[in-house]
Protein backbone atom coordinates (compact mmCIF):
# COMPACT_ATOMS: atom_id res chain seq x y z
CA UNK A 1 0.00 0.00 0.00
CA UNK A 2 1.42 3.40 -0.97
CA UNK A 3 1.72 6.18 1.62
CA UNK A 4 -0.93 8.27 -0.19
CA UNK A 5 -3.37 5.32 -0.24
CA UNK A 6 -2.76 4.69 3.45
CA UNK A 7 -3.48 8.35 4.30
CA UNK A 8 -6.70 8.27 2.27
CA UNK A 9 -7.83 5.16 4.17
CA UNK A 10 -6.80 6.80 7.45
CA UNK A 11 -8.86 9.94 6.71
CA UNK A 12 -11.91 7.86 5.70
CA UNK A 13 -11.59 5.75 8.84
CA UNK A 14 -11.42 8.82 11.06
CA UNK A 15 -14.52 10.30 9.40
CA UNK A 16 -16.44 7.04 9.83
CA UNK A 17 -15.36 6.72 13.46
CA UNK A 18 -16.44 10.29 14.22
CA UNK A 19 -19.85 9.70 12.59
CA UNK A 20 -20.37 6.46 14.51
CA UNK A 21 -19.40 8.17 17.76
CA UNK A 22 -21.83 11.02 17.14
CA UNK A 23 -24.67 8.55 16.42
CA UNK A 24 -23.85 6.49 19.49
CA UNK A 25 -23.88 9.55 21.77
CA UNK A 26 -27.05 11.16 20.40
CA UNK A 27 -29.59 9.17 22.44
CA UNK A 28 -27.76 9.97 25.68
CA UNK A 29 -27.66 13.72 25.07
CA UNK A 30 -30.67 14.39 27.30
CA UNK A 31 -29.30 12.49 30.29
CA UNK A 32 -26.71 13.47 32.86
CA UNK A 33 -23.62 11.34 33.46
CA UNK A 34 -23.69 10.45 37.14
CA UNK A 35 -19.90 10.29 37.26
CA UNK A 36 -19.41 13.78 35.78
CA UNK A 37 -19.56 16.89 37.97
CA UNK A 38 -22.46 19.24 37.17
CA UNK A 39 -21.71 22.57 35.47
CA UNK A 40 -20.91 25.45 37.82
CA UNK A 41 -23.95 27.48 38.85
CA UNK A 42 -24.87 30.22 36.41
CA UNK A 43 -22.65 28.94 33.59
CA UNK A 44 -24.26 27.72 30.39
CA UNK A 45 -22.78 24.46 29.06
CA UNK A 46 -20.62 25.05 25.99
CA UNK A 47 -18.90 22.77 23.48
CA UNK A 48 -15.84 25.02 23.74
CA UNK A 49 -15.76 25.15 27.55
CA UNK A 50 -12.36 23.42 27.73
CA UNK A 51 -10.64 25.68 25.19
CA UNK A 52 -7.91 27.92 26.64
CA UNK A 53 -8.22 31.46 25.31
CA UNK A 54 -5.35 33.53 23.99
CA UNK A 55 -4.52 36.67 22.07
CA UNK A 56 -6.67 37.36 18.96
CA UNK A 57 -9.26 34.70 19.73
CA UNK A 58 -12.77 36.03 19.11
CA UNK A 59 -15.52 35.21 21.61
CA UNK A 60 -19.20 36.01 21.93
CA UNK A 61 -20.45 36.85 25.42
CA UNK A 62 -24.12 36.96 26.34
CA UNK A 63 -26.69 36.46 29.07
CA UNK A 64 -29.17 33.64 28.71
CA UNK A 65 -32.64 35.05 28.05
CA UNK A 66 -31.52 38.69 27.76
CA UNK A 67 -30.67 40.84 24.74
CA UNK A 68 -29.28 43.88 26.59
CA UNK A 69 -25.89 42.33 27.37
CA UNK A 70 -24.28 40.60 24.44
CA UNK A 71 -21.53 41.16 21.94
CA UNK A 72 -18.61 39.78 20.01
CA UNK A 73 -15.13 40.80 21.11
CA UNK A 74 -11.49 39.96 20.39
CA UNK A 75 -8.90 39.11 23.03
CA UNK A 76 -6.47 42.02 23.10
CA UNK A 77 -2.68 41.97 23.33
CA UNK A 78 -2.88 42.43 27.12
CA UNK A 79 -5.08 39.33 27.41
CA UNK A 80 -8.29 41.17 28.21
CA UNK A 81 -11.68 41.84 26.64
CA UNK A 82 -13.90 44.88 27.06
CA UNK A 83 -17.52 44.33 28.12
CA UNK A 84 -20.47 46.62 28.84
CA UNK A 85 -21.09 47.57 32.49
CA UNK A 86 -18.03 45.78 33.91
CA UNK A 87 -15.23 47.01 31.60
CA UNK A 88 -12.03 45.00 31.17
CA UNK A 89 -12.01 41.30 31.99
CA UNK A 90 -8.80 39.20 31.95
CA UNK A 91 -9.39 36.12 29.78
CA UNK A 92 -5.99 34.95 28.45
CA UNK A 93 -4.97 31.48 29.65
CA UNK A 94 -8.51 30.86 30.91
CA UNK A 95 -11.12 28.47 29.57
CA UNK A 96 -14.44 29.81 28.37
CA UNK A 97 -16.03 28.22 31.44
CA UNK A 98 -13.70 30.21 33.70
CA UNK A 99 -14.43 33.42 31.80
CA UNK A 100 -18.17 32.77 32.13
CA UNK A 101 -17.80 32.48 35.89
CA UNK A 102 -15.61 35.62 36.12
CA UNK A 103 -18.16 37.66 34.14
CA UNK A 104 -21.02 36.29 36.22
CA UNK A 105 -19.31 37.25 39.49
CA UNK A 106 -18.49 40.74 38.18
CA UNK A 107 -22.11 41.33 37.19
CA UNK A 108 -23.38 40.11 40.56
CA UNK A 109 -20.84 42.05 42.65
CA UNK A 110 -21.53 45.18 40.64
CA UNK A 111 -25.22 44.90 41.41
CA UNK A 112 -26.26 44.67 37.76
CA UNK A 113 -27.94 41.25 37.92
CA UNK A 114 -28.81 38.93 40.79
CA UNK A 115 -28.05 35.53 39.26
CA UNK A 116 -27.19 35.81 35.55
CA UNK A 117 -26.46 32.82 33.31
CA UNK A 118 -23.44 33.83 31.22
CA UNK A 119 -22.67 32.24 27.85
CA UNK A 120 -19.24 32.42 26.26
CA UNK A 121 -18.67 30.91 22.85
CA UNK A 122 -15.46 30.94 20.80
CA UNK A 123 -16.32 32.10 17.28
CA UNK A 124 -12.77 32.62 16.00
CA UNK A 125 -9.78 30.47 16.93
CA UNK A 126 -6.47 32.25 16.43
CA UNK A 127 -4.17 31.75 19.42
CA UNK A 128 -3.83 27.98 19.54
CA UNK A 129 -2.64 26.18 16.44
CA UNK A 130 -0.11 23.74 15.05
CA UNK A 131 2.07 24.34 12.00
CA UNK A 132 2.12 21.60 9.35
CA UNK A 133 4.89 21.76 6.77
CA UNK A 134 6.74 19.65 4.23
CA UNK A 135 5.45 17.13 1.73
CA UNK A 136 1.83 17.56 2.81
CA UNK A 137 -1.40 17.79 0.83
CA UNK A 138 -2.36 21.21 2.29
CA UNK A 139 0.38 22.61 4.55
CA UNK A 140 -0.37 25.58 6.80
CA UNK A 141 -1.53 26.70 10.23
CA UNK A 142 -4.20 24.41 11.72
CA UNK A 143 -6.27 25.86 14.62
CA UNK A 144 -6.89 23.44 17.46
CA UNK A 145 -10.11 24.10 19.35
CA UNK A 146 -9.98 20.77 21.22
CA UNK A 147 -7.47 17.98 21.83
CA UNK A 148 -6.43 16.54 18.44
CA UNK A 149 -4.36 13.43 17.84
CA UNK A 150 -1.60 13.50 15.26
CA UNK A 151 -3.61 11.25 12.93
CA UNK A 152 -6.52 13.72 13.01
CA UNK A 153 -4.28 16.63 12.05
CA UNK A 154 -2.81 14.55 9.22
CA UNK A 155 -6.31 13.77 7.96
CA UNK A 156 -7.30 17.46 8.12
CA UNK A 157 -4.41 18.49 5.85
CA UNK A 158 -5.09 15.81 3.25
CA UNK A 159 -2.38 13.35 4.22
CA UNK A 160 1.14 13.25 2.85
CA UNK A 161 2.22 13.32 -0.78
CA UNK A 162 3.64 10.41 -2.74
CA UNK A 163 7.07 11.98 -2.38
CA UNK A 164 6.94 11.98 1.43
CA UNK A 165 8.81 9.72 3.78
CA UNK A 166 6.86 7.15 5.80
CA UNK A 167 7.20 9.09 9.05
CA UNK A 168 6.42 12.51 10.54
CA UNK A 169 8.63 14.72 12.69
CA UNK A 170 6.95 16.64 15.51
CA UNK A 171 8.88 19.47 17.18
CA UNK A 172 7.36 20.97 20.33
CA UNK A 173 7.72 24.57 21.48
CA UNK A 174 10.54 23.57 23.87
CA UNK A 175 12.62 22.14 21.00
CA UNK A 176 11.96 18.46 21.68
CA UNK A 177 11.65 16.49 18.43
CA UNK A 178 9.89 13.15 18.04
CA UNK A 179 9.51 10.78 15.07
CA UNK A 180 6.27 8.93 14.35
CA UNK A 181 5.88 6.27 11.61
CA UNK A 182 2.71 7.11 9.64
CA UNK A 183 1.50 3.52 9.47
CA UNK A 184 1.54 3.24 13.28
CA UNK A 185 -0.77 6.24 13.69
CA UNK A 186 -3.75 3.98 13.10
CA UNK A 187 -2.34 0.59 14.11
CA UNK A 188 -0.46 1.54 17.27
CA UNK A 189 -1.55 2.68 20.71
CA UNK A 190 -1.86 6.16 22.18
CA UNK A 191 1.91 6.54 22.38
CA UNK A 192 2.19 6.05 18.61
CA UNK A 193 -0.64 8.56 17.93
CA UNK A 194 -0.27 11.26 20.58
CA UNK A 195 -2.25 14.44 21.13
CA UNK A 196 -0.62 17.46 19.54
CA UNK A 197 -0.03 20.60 21.56
CA UNK A 198 -0.41 24.25 20.67
CA UNK A 199 2.82 25.47 19.09
CA UNK A 200 3.85 22.06 17.74
CA UNK A 201 5.47 21.99 14.31
CA UNK A 202 4.65 18.90 12.25
CA UNK A 203 6.98 18.20 9.33
CA UNK A 204 6.66 15.58 6.60
CA UNK A 205 10.15 15.20 5.05
CA UNK A 206 10.76 14.06 1.51
CA UNK A 207 11.42 10.36 1.25
CA UNK A 208 15.00 9.22 0.75
CA UNK A 209 15.55 7.37 -2.50
CA UNK A 210 17.57 4.61 -4.13
CA UNK A 211 17.90 3.27 -7.67
CA UNK A 212 17.39 -0.09 -9.32
CA UNK A 213 18.98 -0.68 -12.71
CA UNK A 214 19.80 -3.58 -14.97
CA UNK A 215 17.64 -6.60 -15.71
CA UNK A 216 14.37 -5.69 -13.96
CA UNK A 217 11.03 -4.90 -15.54
CA UNK A 218 10.75 -1.31 -14.24
CA UNK A 219 14.17 0.16 -13.49
CA UNK A 220 14.40 3.62 -11.97
CA UNK A 221 14.32 5.67 -8.78
CA UNK A 222 12.28 4.39 -5.82
CA UNK A 223 11.46 5.83 -2.41
CA UNK A 224 13.00 4.20 0.64
CA UNK A 225 10.40 2.99 3.14
CA UNK A 226 10.96 1.07 6.36
CA UNK A 227 13.57 -1.68 6.29
CA UNK A 228 13.69 -2.18 2.53
CA UNK A 229 15.82 -5.13 1.43
CA UNK A 230 17.30 -5.91 -1.96
CA UNK A 231 14.62 -8.56 -2.40
CA UNK A 232 11.76 -6.11 -1.84
CA UNK A 233 13.54 -3.50 -3.98
CA UNK A 234 13.58 -5.91 -6.93
CA UNK A 235 9.89 -6.65 -6.39
CA UNK A 236 9.05 -2.94 -6.34
CA UNK A 237 11.00 -2.50 -9.56
CA UNK A 238 8.65 -4.91 -11.30
CA UNK A 239 10.57 -8.09 -10.56
CA UNK A 240 13.34 -9.71 -12.53
CA UNK A 241 13.28 -9.39 -16.27
CA UNK A 242 13.32 -12.64 -18.25
CA UNK A 243 17.08 -12.42 -18.61
CA UNK A 244 17.75 -11.19 -15.03
CA UNK A 245 19.55 -13.14 -12.33
CA UNK A 246 19.02 -12.70 -8.59
CA UNK A 247 22.47 -14.20 -8.08
CA UNK A 248 24.14 -11.32 -9.88
CA UNK A 249 23.21 -8.36 -7.72
CA UNK A 250 25.62 -5.56 -6.88
CA UNK A 251 25.19 -2.31 -4.95
CA UNK A 252 27.11 0.90 -5.54
CA UNK A 253 27.40 2.74 -2.23
CA UNK A 254 29.77 5.52 -1.27
CA UNK A 255 31.77 5.13 -4.48
CA UNK A 256 32.27 1.41 -3.96
CA UNK A 257 30.57 -1.42 -5.81
CA UNK A 258 30.00 -4.63 -3.87
CA UNK A 259 28.09 -7.88 -4.37
CA UNK A 260 25.16 -8.33 -1.97
CA UNK A 261 22.58 -10.99 -1.15
CA UNK A 262 18.83 -10.51 -1.43
CA UNK A 263 18.32 -9.94 2.30
CA UNK A 264 20.79 -7.06 2.50
CA UNK A 265 19.26 -3.81 3.73
CA UNK A 266 19.00 -0.96 1.22
CA UNK A 267 20.43 2.40 2.27
CA UNK A 268 19.67 5.92 0.97
CA UNK A 269 21.37 6.62 -2.36
CA UNK A 270 22.13 2.97 -3.14
CA UNK A 271 22.30 1.98 -6.80
CA UNK A 272 21.25 -1.65 -7.11
CA UNK A 273 22.23 -3.33 -10.37
CA UNK A 274 20.75 -6.63 -11.48
CA UNK A 275 22.99 -8.64 -13.79
CA UNK A 276 22.08 -10.89 -16.70
CA UNK A 277 21.94 -14.64 -16.32
CA UNK A 278 24.08 -16.73 -18.62
CA UNK A 279 21.33 -19.02 -19.95
Image (cartoon, rainbow, N blue to C red):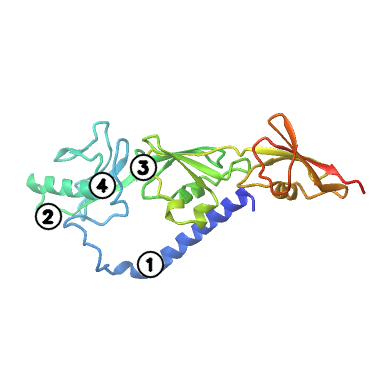
Q: Earlier in the sequence, mark 3 or mark 2?
A: 2
Q: Earlier in the sequence, mark 1 or mark 4?
A: 1
Q: Residue at x 78, y 50 (%)?
A: 239
Query: What residue sits right under mark 1 in the picture?
Result: 26
Mark 2 vs mark 1, foreground winner is 1
Name the mark on residue 125.
3
Q: Nearer the viewer, residue 176 or 38?
A: 176
159 relative to 201 in the view: left or right? right
Q: Residue at x 54, y 44 (%)?
A: 167
Q: For the residues marked 3 and 1, what is the alpha-carbon distance in whole angstroms?
A: 26 Å
Tag 4's secondary structure?
A: loop
Tag 1's secondary structure?
A: helix
Mark 1 vs mark 4, foreground winner is 4
Q: For the residues marked 3 and 2, what is the alpha-carbon distance in whole angstroms?
A: 29 Å
Name the mark on residue 115.
2
Crowding around mark 4 (Cα neighbors within 10 Å: few <14, some 14 to 19, many 20+) is some
Q: Earlier in the sequence, mark 3 or mark 1?
A: 1
Q: Quadrant of residue 83?
A: top left
Q: Nearer the viewer, residue 6 or 46?
A: 6
Q: Residue at x 71, y 29 (%)?
A: 255
Q: For the residues marked 2 and 1, what is the alpha-carbon distance in whole angstroms?
A: 31 Å
Vertical arrangement, residue 120 with respect to residue 201, above or below: below
Image coords of residue 45 (percent x, y): 26, 57
Amino acid sequence: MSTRTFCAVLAAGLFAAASASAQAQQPAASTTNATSPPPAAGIADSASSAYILGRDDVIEVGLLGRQDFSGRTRVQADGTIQLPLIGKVPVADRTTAEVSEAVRKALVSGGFFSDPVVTVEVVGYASRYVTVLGSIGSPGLIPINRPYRLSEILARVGGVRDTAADYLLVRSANGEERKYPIRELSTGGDAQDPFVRAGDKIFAPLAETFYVSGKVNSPGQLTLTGDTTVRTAIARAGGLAESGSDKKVTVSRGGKKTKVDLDSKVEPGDVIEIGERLF
